[in-house]
Image: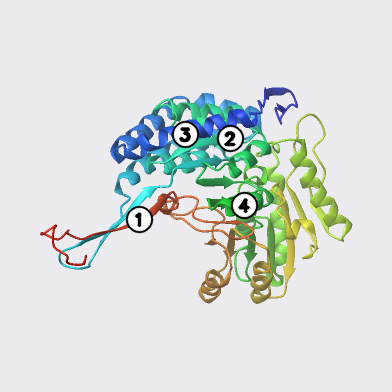
């Protein structure tokens, strides 16, 4: 399998596909190393992550260049992802030794504890759209809590993913972090491997469903952050220009290839015309600020969604056709006249497309935004405190953002809903996902071992 530069179409890397034997050997090495790593003091495990963070920062330009060439992610965004990844490793190095259980109040003569323990071997399957930052969270949490890991980076950015993992593995004992390359067949092998205790996956919902089934069949744990179809609601009374800026940032940043990108827009009729006009202007301004889609396959998917919408009656206000020339560029696109049955409204497009549906009022916008099989995130732009309160309480998603397309405090962790996955995929709560709680009841033995007294 060849990876091409999405800016030029030129080959940049080849994906080696690990066979079943190589995958099994990697899992076996991780299993063999798991006992000693679990017994390693948490502070020592954390020191490895801290050293790795320094190595990642030092290799920042190298990682950013690899990412840019393999996925088309702009250099500044790529460097930001590297810095975010290094920062995440440091955060888990600090949080790991503080992750603790509880003492319980039982009998005066007994000791009762709840103690978190590593789950064992974790398979980590990471995506291409932010390969360093996302991998840093899952790898950091798994490793600092005492698990060993077999990591498969995305086949769309194999050199970026492998190089990052190698920098981390160099600071750890042999076998603690194994790396395997390959496509979905390698991920499927790891998801079904008997000696893998946890599968952590960020990627498509279809792949996530397969992983969930494989884990359920053998009693393994699955941590899944999968597709999203995130809605943005524009309420009456907001500034149309500001709302358009928020919508454009949400829909077009990283060419729409962010897990929580804005995928569908509901605007209240009272501000619709001014909002759409401003959004079209914003889209044209963004045209020179976005990179390509990751590859031709993704561009084809995006254009299929746009073509389906136009065929069903939507209007292209700007964009709407693949950019001529080399690479997999697609322009920022605004569609109006969108209806619920269109692909752009019911599926994750994952490209720079802003489909707009005009609704009569906020209640209708909220109802339609909530009617979706995904449950990752949503954004609400409103000046009405009651509307904001109603929205965050009623939207069936893991993250609700009020008056900001992106942002949030460090450490905020949410659980995706429905087709978007399950389990905490980041934050301090991810440490709890990566560990299993054991209850210990320690009662004293009878002082006279020869007595016939019953155990208490």
Does label 3 or label 2 sit earlier along the sequence? 3
Does label 2 or label 1 sit earlier along the sequence? 2
Mark 3 element type? helix
Mark 1 element type? strand
Disc 2 target residue? 153
> Relative to 246, is 153 above or below?
above
User: Which mark identifies residue 438?
Assistant: 1
Disc 4 target residue? 250
Please give the name of the residue rendered at 65% of the width and 53% of the height, measured from the top-left corner.
209
The quadrant of the picture occupied by the N terminus is top right
Is 103 in front, or is 170?
103
The answer to whether residue 251 is left or right of residue 102 is: right
Q: Marks 2 and 1: CB-CB under 8 Å?
A: no
* Picture coordinates of residue 231, whole percent (x, y): 65, 61
Is 121 in front, or is 433?
121
* Picture coordinates of residue 378, whole percent (x, y): 59, 61
Q: Nearer the viewer, mark 2 or mark 1?
A: 1
- Residue at the extreme right: 311
Q: Marks 2 and 4: CB-CB under 8 Å?
A: no
Does label 1 or label 4 sit earlier along the sequence? 4
* Picture coordinates of residue 42, whole percent (x, y): 31, 40
Mark 2 element type? loop
């Amino acid at each position: 399998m060849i990876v091409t530069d999405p800016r030029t179409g030129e080959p940049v890397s080849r994906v080696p596909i690990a066979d079943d034997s190589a995958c099994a050997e990697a899992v076996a090495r991780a299993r063999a190393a798991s006992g000693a790593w679990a017994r390693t003091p948490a502070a020592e495990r954390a020191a490895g992550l801290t050293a790795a963070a320094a190595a990642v920062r030092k290799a920042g330009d190298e990682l950013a260049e690899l990412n840019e060439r393999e996925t088309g992610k702009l250099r500044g965004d790529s460097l930001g992802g590297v810095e975010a990844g290094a920062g995440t490793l440091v955060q888990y190095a600090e949080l790991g030794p503080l992750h603790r259980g509880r003492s319980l109040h039982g009998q005066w003569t007994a000791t009762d504890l709840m103690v978190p323990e590593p789950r064992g071997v974790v398979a980590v399957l990471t995506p291409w759209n932010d390969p360093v930052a996302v991998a840093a969270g899952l790898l950091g949490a798994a490793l600092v809590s005492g698990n060993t890991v077999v990591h498969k980076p995305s086949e769309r950015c194999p050199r970026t993913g492998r190089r990052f993992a190698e920098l981390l593995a160099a600071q750890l004992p042999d076998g603690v972090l194994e790396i395997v390359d390959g496509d979905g067949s390698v991920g499927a092998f790891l998801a079904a491997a008997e000696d893998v205790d946890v599968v952590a996956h960020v990627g498509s919902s279809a792949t996530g469903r397969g992983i969930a089934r494989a884990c359920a069949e053998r009693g393994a744990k699955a941590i899944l952050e999968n597709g999203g179809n995130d809605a943005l609601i524009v309420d009456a009374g907001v500034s149309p220009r500001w709302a358009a800026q928020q919508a454009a940032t949400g829909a077009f940043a990283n060419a729409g290839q962010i897990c929580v990108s804005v995928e569908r827009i509901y605007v209240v009729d009272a501000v619709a015309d001014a909002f759409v006009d401003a959004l079209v202007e914003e889209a044209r301004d963004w045209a020179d600020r976005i990179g390509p889609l990751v590859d031709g396959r993704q561009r084809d998917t995006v254009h299929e969604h746009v073509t389906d919408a136009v065929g069903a009656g939507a209007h292209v206000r700007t964009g709407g056709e693949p950019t001529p020339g080399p690479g997999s560029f697609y322009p920022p696109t605004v569609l109006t006249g969108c209806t619920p049955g269109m692909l752009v409204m019911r599926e994750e497009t994952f490209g720079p497309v802003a489909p707009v549906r005009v609704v009569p009022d906020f209640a209708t916008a909220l109802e339609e935004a909530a009617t979706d099989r995904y449950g990752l995130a949503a954004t609400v732009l409103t000046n009405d405190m009651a509307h904001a309160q109603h929205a965050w309480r009623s939207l069936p998603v893991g993250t609700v953002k009020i008056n900001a397309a992106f942002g949030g405090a460090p450490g905020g962790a949410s659980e995706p809903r429905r087709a978007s996955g399950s389990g905490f995929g980041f934050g301090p709560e991810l440490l709890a996902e990566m560990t299993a709680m054991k209850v210990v009841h320690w009662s004293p033995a009878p002082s006279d071992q020869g007595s016939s007294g019953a155990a208490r």
